[in-house]
Image (cartoon, rainbow, N blue to C red):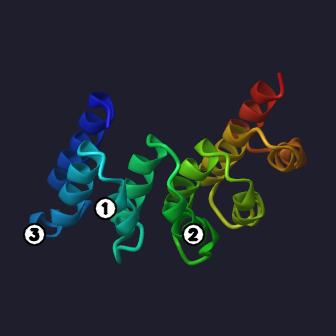
Amino acid sequence: MSGALRRGLSGLLALALGSGLAPAPAQAGPLRAVLRAADEADDDALVGFLDHKRAYVREQAARALAGRPARPAALPPLRACVGDSTAPGWLRAACAAPLGRWGDAEAVPIIELALAEVDPESRYWLAEALHQMQHPEARAVLQGLRGTDELLLSTALHAWAR
C-alpha cells in the first residue's frame, strides 16, 4: 500500500474514532486489521474482509484492493457487494472501484442495476468504475446516462466523452 493511501486510511480511522461516527475503540480492531493487511500487501486477508459483517470494514478492504493487482478470489464477493440492494450506496460504490480498475466486464450489468438504486454521489462513483473499465458494454451504459440532471455525473460524463 502506498504511504499516501495508508496515511489517508489511518487519518480516516483516527477522525472517525474521535468523532463518535465510527465504532468504539473496541470495535476498531477489524479496521486496524484491514490497514495492517493493506500495508503488508496481504491480499488474501483483504479478500477475507470483504465478507465481514461490518460495512465499513468491507468498504476499507475494497478500497485497499482497488490499489492492488486483480485477485480472482475477490471478484465474487465484490460483485455480490455491488449487487446487494440492501447495502448502502457508499459501500456498493467502494466495491465497484476494484472491479472497474481490474476491467471486470462481468460486473457491468451488476453495476448498471446498482446505478438505479443508489444516491447521486454513489451513482457518480459507480459510473467512475464503469469509466475505468474501457469496455464497450461499460461505455454503452455510460452513454445511456448522458442527459442526466445530476450535475456531478453530467459533468463527469461530458469530460469522459472527450
Q: Quarter of the image containing the C terminus?
A: top right
Amino acid marked by disc 2: Pro
Name the side, left or right, on which 155 lies relative to 40: right
Amino acid marked by disc 1: Ala
Q: Quarter of the image containing the N terminus?
A: top left
The residue positioned 77% from the left and 37% from the top of the image is 154
Q: Can you tell which of label 3 and label 2 is closer to the viewer?
A: 2
The residue at which mark 2 appears reads as 76
The residue positioned 85% from the left and 50% from the top of the image is 137
The residue at which mark 1 appears reads as 45
Measure how far apart labels 1 and 3 are at the Cα level: 20 Å
Instruction: Tell me the tag on residue 26.
Output: 3
Instruction: Tell me the tag on residue 149.
Output: none
Q: Earlier in the sequence, mark 3 or mark 2?
A: 3
Under circle 1, the secondary element is: helix
- Rendered view: 85 above or below 120: below
Q: Position of residue 143 (x, y in %)?
A: 88, 43
Measure how far apart labels 3 and 2 are at the Cα level: 30 Å
Under circle 2, the secondary element is: helix
Amino acid marked by disc 3: Ala
Q: Can you tell which of label 1 and label 3 is closer to the viewer?
A: 1
Q: Which quadrant would residue 12 be assigned to in this image?
A: top left
The front one of 34 and 151 is 34
Q: Position of residue 158 (x, y in %)?
A: 81, 29
The front one of 116 and 45 is 45
